[in-house]
Image (cartoon, rainbow, N blue to C red):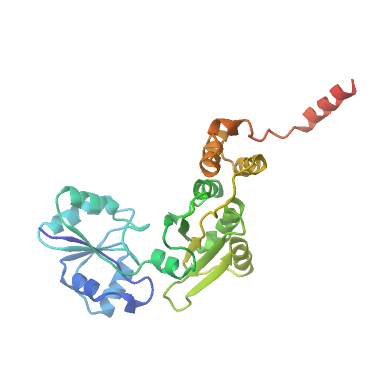
Amino acid sequence: MGTLYLVATPIGNLEDITLRALRVLRECALIASEDTRTTRRLLDHFGIQTPLLSYFEHNKLTRLEQVLIALQSGDVALVSEAGTPLLSDPGYELVQAVLERGIPVMPVPGPSALLAALSVSGLPTDRFMYLGFLPRRSPERRRTLSEVAGLRATLVCFEAPHRLVAALADACAVLGGERRCAIGRELTKLHEEVWRGTLAGAYAEWQARPPRGEFTLVIAGAPAEAAWDVERVRAALAELRAAGISRSEAARQVARRSGWARRALYGLWPDEPATDTQQINQGQELSV
């Protein structure tokens, strides 16, 4: 019986691979790879000839049995396209299946865009929440951000370049443009950059120049603030209503953030704006 190794690989600079990772990749019987082209370039660079098996999001279930069979007679290494496996990458189902069969699973730690961005952000690292990739559509993205808006923990997420500006706009609207943030771009690569400032500043920055490369967003947690008064509660509810969030969900979120009882918040839900016809009718009633 073999061992399944979860091997972290470089997110850019090939020198970041560990000696242990090289040994495991060289000695194992099979490497299950999210992107065999990227992994082959890595293996060729270090002269490693281990057989590769494609294992990515759309074939992970059909390939699972092949990996389990290979583990009966030798070790298997699981690698993602870059960084640490299972962090926004396939592998969860494989690990679960391997553990259910009593097969050992061992990490080979190393590069991670998540931890690299967090460590250089200049923001608190004692508590953080990893959000993975933010939802593609704005309503779902705002809903996700609203759910974590009151957390004191630092927030970390990945974002595609073509959605970065829209994501920053939603973050400003939901979290507030004054929140501090750090934007990691192309970490450990030739054009590596870490931009630091506020969400509003980041939105202006990336509106002014086309986003290119891979981005990791690190956003400060909610600040410690004074007790919520009625006006602040009304404003929070109105903001969530404008984001398309239902009254019950908005009340739940604001109750968690403010300490108010949820039942008390229902009566503060913003009324529907009056239509032109309603305003005319109201004017006629007042004139009678």
Q: Position of residue 282 (x, y in %)?
A: 82, 26
Residue at 55%, 67% (x, y): give it. Answer: 211
> Looking at the image, which is closer to me, 237 or 285?
237
Specify the quadrant that holds the N terminus: bottom left
Against 226, residue 122 (above or below) is: below
Is residue 205 found left or right of 109 in the rendered image?
right
Q: Position of residue 88 (x, y in %)?
A: 37, 57
Residue at 54%, 33% (x, y): give it. Answer: 262
Residue at 50%, 52% (x, y): give it. Answer: 136
Q: Residue furthest front?
A: 226
Residue at 58%, 68% (x, y): give it. Answer: 210
- All told, the count of numbered labels is 0
Quadrant of residue 29 in the image? bottom left
Q: Position of residue 281 (x, y in %)?
A: 82, 25
Against 219, residue 231 (above or below) is: above
Quadrant of residue 44 in the image? bottom left
Quadrant of residue 67 in the image? bottom left
> Looking at the image, which is closer to me, 176 or 274?
176
Residue 62 appears in the figure: no
Residue 220 appears in the figure: yes
Against 84, residue 243 (above or below) is: above
Specify the quadrant that holds the C terminus: top right
Q: Residue furthest top?
A: 288
Q: Position of residue 113 (x, y in %)?
A: 40, 66
